[in-house]
Image (cartoon, rainbow, N blue to C red):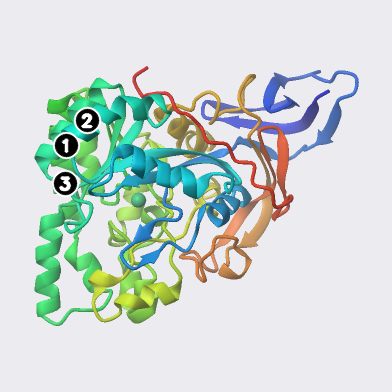
Amino acid sequence: MGTILAGAAVCTGSGSFRADLRLVGERIDAVGFDLSRPGDKVIDVSGRLLLPGGVDVHTHFDLPLAATSTADDFASGTAAALLGGTTTIVDYATAFRGQSAAQGLEAWHGRARGRAFCDYGFHLALTEWNEALAAELPGIVDGGVSSFKMYMAYKESLQVGDGALYAAARRVGELGGLLCVHCENGDLIAERAEELIASGVTGPEGHPLSRPPLVETEAVGRMIAVADLARCPLYVVHVSADGSMREIVMARRRGQAVFAETCPQYLLLDESRYGRGGLKGAAFVLSPPLRPAGNGEALWGRLARGEIDTVATDHCSFTLAQKEAGLDDFRLIPGGLPGVEHRLALLYSEGVVKGRLSLERFVESCCTAPARLFGLYPRKGTLAPGSDGDIVVVDPEEEWTISAETQRQNSDYTPYEGVRVKGRIESVYLRGRQVVRRGRLFGETPRGLFLRRRPFAR
Ligand SMILES: [Zn+2]
């Protein structure tokens, strides 16, 4: 016995068309016409859009950071994801210095197990490089964690040097994995921040001054060279500056496997937010920082043309009380924004409705490409027979307003407060089961599964 969603426009990364969709159990059974069998339940969704469940490949839930921890854990973060139409997240597990890869990963399994409302996978961030880690990686890949991350910034805690980047990239490349890199020059940032503090610039407005676009663009260029020499496919996380995209586009033209991710905040917000000072500015501190006005429109163009592959959130939420910690020294403001709940709404309304993005590019960059790059396609990221029944039903006409008061993500603000959105999620299906209906989660039982991901090159 199946369920038929009848009469909607089925939207995929390669086109949208009027069709019915039949769900059986956890999977999509068929897409087309005259699908009904005796006993099937038919749900009329005419006038609606059917999207594949969103895939957000950059979140930080329950991340310990200095003296604090992110405001969202796996329960609140994945519930917010589902309400926003994201049915799969890939979070950054981290092996901190002195830990084995297995220890880092097991800590994140412990945080997520039995608490996740949507399906989830892990990347593994490595904060140093040594022979023991090199020996462990094949087992990590076999366990379904096939992408790794390294940081060129955060000098005191996460940053690794070029030698470690190169050696790790060699190993990851050999294993068919994908290396994700946070590209900002941490040494330059530390020096500039010192200069600013010494000259009396201590508030949030110092944050973007300490890490201007060149700090990112230099690191992107350097990492492209490292990955090329190491023969490792490279995924540049949260590209914020248009100049960095020029480096990536040139590398791709040379035939190198380099992929680019950006985030809604770099498309929609600019650095004027820091000029508001105090807590109003601190609320927008994240790394890389928001960029000058005009940079966002350039990124929209690159996303529309397919030069930017994916849109993820880098969801890393703190409350305003947590942000207060660094009001006298911008270096101490916990960096990150909430966003997992509003990615699809913002990209649809600000992108598709406003004519910056085709419906196909929207689905491709928010669902299909992230699933493909991270070894989840075609199980996730598309609407096709055999795929998981992860479906978002959208009323394209309904309008609503984003507000911290009505969000589920566990922060007392949203960077998009007051933004008017056209297009509202009516319901969400996770593996064939309706889990969201008109802004409400069905039940409080977490049903998210850990997803073992295939390596990039296999
Ligand atoms: Zn991040």
Identified by mark 3, the residue type is Val
Please state, as top left, top right, bottom left or bottom right, where the C terminus lies in the image.
top left
User: Which numbered mark, 2 or 3, is in the foreground of this view?
Assistant: 2
Tell me which residue sits at (38%, 35%) in the image: 309
Disc 2 residue crowd, few under 14, some 14–19, many 20+, Cα 10 Å: some
Tell me which residue sits at (27%, 56%) in the image: 288
In the picture provided, is 302 more to the left or to the right than 45? Answer: left
Tell me which residue sits at (63%, 51%) in the image: 83
**Ligand 1 under 8 Å from disc 2 Cβ:** no
Residue occupied by mark 3 = 160
Q: Nearer the viewer, residue 297 or 130?
A: 130
Residue occupied by mark 2 = 134
Identified by mark 2, the residue type is Ala
In the picture provided, is 18 more to the left or to the right than 279? Answer: right
Residue occupied by mark 1 = 130
Please state, as top left, top right, bottom left or bottom right, where the N terminus lies in the image.
top right
Q: Nearer the viewer, residue 298 or 152?
A: 152
Q: Is residue 250 in view?
A: no
